[in-house]
Image (cartoon, rainbow, N blue to C red):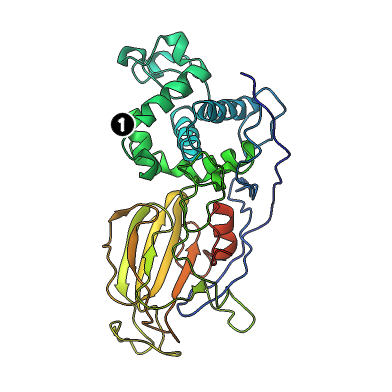
């Protein structure tokens, strides 16, 4: 395969800050960055470009990405380049890379004898007996990637499905929910190997940044197109755990990414009252009507001050960009706005909170009104 190498990708590294949880009107300024876990692995920040430079050549010198070997990263680069050559948009690249991470850890596996799942082989564990091709073909990274994309293309609305559902419709796996956990790192890999392509509009070949509320290839979108008002843990409001997106009442609020609704409630105020169907006021306390959603990678988003009972229910699966409620001013609020929080590791406390502005910037779905 002949593929051109783009300009260098800028890698931004830093550390995640511990924060506080509280609900009310909020702010801006972020520092989401590389976070080391117990094994010392890091979540690597990636390019703020949107794929205009194109994917790297798999045969060129490739960047080191987390614990993956040079051969595994080369396989990921092949998957991405095949997707581009087939004119599949960047959301497909993220889905394909995440699928291969789950199926083979980006390794081109041969027949493993008794350990084999039937006769599955190659990066995507495709089965010759099921018509995917000969054993030699499914062990060819270009061939197996091509077959994956060709099948994905036949799935109606695949680009609107949560990653795990899109992958499952192609793979028919015994573990249909396993793909989602790879989405965040697959996004980083695509960004580093394709000039920030996961920041581009996910269902388009234009490689335009996902502004104006479009869903990025990363699977994220803005919950509300609005200017950012009160900021995250500012000097005047150090316990403010999110940012405020200020607009008029009743504007639709969207799920920032696909996930499962983990909480819907009328949050109690400082006096223990659940009075959310009326406008609140500063000092009342509580989030008013609120929603929490758990996304891939155990990221949780929180949406506060809705005008009425949210449109979703607990345990409901939602897609990125799906309407979950409308802007209001319930709870500890001085006027209509959406208070929006992001928490890592599904930690609902202040310790899990990170600044939504920088987090959303890194997903390719920056907050704030488009210029």
Q: Nearer the viewer, residue 346 or 247?
A: 247
State whether residue 149 is above or below residue 235: above
Q: Secondary structure at mark 1?
A: loop
351 lies left or right of 115: right
350 lies left or right of 254: right
Residue position marked by numbered label 1 in the rendering: 174
Where's residue 7, x and y in %?
Answer: 73, 38
Where's residue 314, x and y in %?
Answer: 28, 61
State whether residue 203 is above or below residue 128: below
Q: Residue at x 49, y 38 (%)?
A: 94
Q: Is residue 137 visible?
A: yes
Q: Residue at x 33, y 59 (%)?
A: 261
Where's residue 292, x and y in %?
Answer: 38, 64
- Which corner quadrant of the image does residue 354 belong to? bottom right
Q: Nearer the viewer, residue 54 or 172?
A: 54
| Quarter the N terminus occupies | top right
Label 1 Cα crowd, 10 Å radius (few <14 / some 14-19 / many 20+): few
């Amino acid at each position: 395969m002949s593929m051109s190498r783009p300009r260098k990708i800028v890698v931004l590294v830093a550390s995640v800050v511990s924060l506080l949880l509280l609900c009310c009107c909020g702010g801006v300024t972020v520092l989401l960055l590389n976070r080391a876990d117990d094994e010392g692995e890091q979540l690597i920040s990636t390019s703020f470009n949107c794929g205009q430079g194109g994917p790297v050549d798999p045969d060129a010198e490739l960047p080191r990405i987390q614990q993956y070997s040079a051969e595994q990263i080369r396989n990921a680069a092949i998957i991405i380049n095949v997707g581009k050559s087939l004119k599949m948009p960047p959301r497909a690249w993220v889905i394909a890379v995440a699928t291969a991470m789950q199926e083979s850890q980006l390794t081109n596996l041969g027949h493993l004898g008794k350990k084999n799942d039937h006769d599955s082989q190659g990066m995507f564990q495709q089965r010759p007996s099921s018509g995917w091709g000969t054993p030699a073909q499914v062990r060819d990274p270009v061939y197996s990637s091509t077959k994956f994309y060709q099948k994905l293309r036949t799935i109606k609305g695949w680009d609107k499905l949560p990653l795990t559902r899109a992958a499952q419709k192609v793979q028919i796996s015994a573990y249909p929910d396993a793909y989602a956990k790879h989405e965040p790192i697959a996004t980083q890999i695509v960004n580093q190997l394709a000039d920030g392509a996961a920041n581009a509009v996910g269902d388009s070949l234009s490689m335009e940044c996902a502004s104006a509320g479009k869903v990025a290839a990363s699977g994220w979108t803005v919950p509300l197109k609005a200017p950012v008002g009160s900021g995250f843990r500012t000097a005047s409001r150090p316990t403010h755990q999110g940012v405020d997106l200020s607009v008029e009442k009743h504007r639709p609020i969207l799920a920032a990414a696909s996930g499962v609704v983990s909480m819907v409630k009328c949050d109690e105020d400082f006096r223990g009252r659940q009075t959310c169907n009326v406008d609140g006021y500063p000092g009342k306390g509580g989030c008013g009507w609120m929603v929490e959603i758990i996304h891939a990678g155990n990221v949780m988003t929180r949406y506060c001050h809705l005008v009425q009972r949210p449109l979703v229910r607990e345990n409901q699966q939602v897609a990125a960009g799906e309407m979950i409620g409308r802007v209001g001013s319930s709870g500890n609020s001085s006027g209509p706005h959406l208070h929006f929080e992001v928490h890592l590791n599904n930690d609902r406390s202040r310790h899990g909170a990170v600044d939504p502005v920088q987090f959303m910037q890194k997903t390719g779905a920056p907050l704030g009104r488009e210029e």
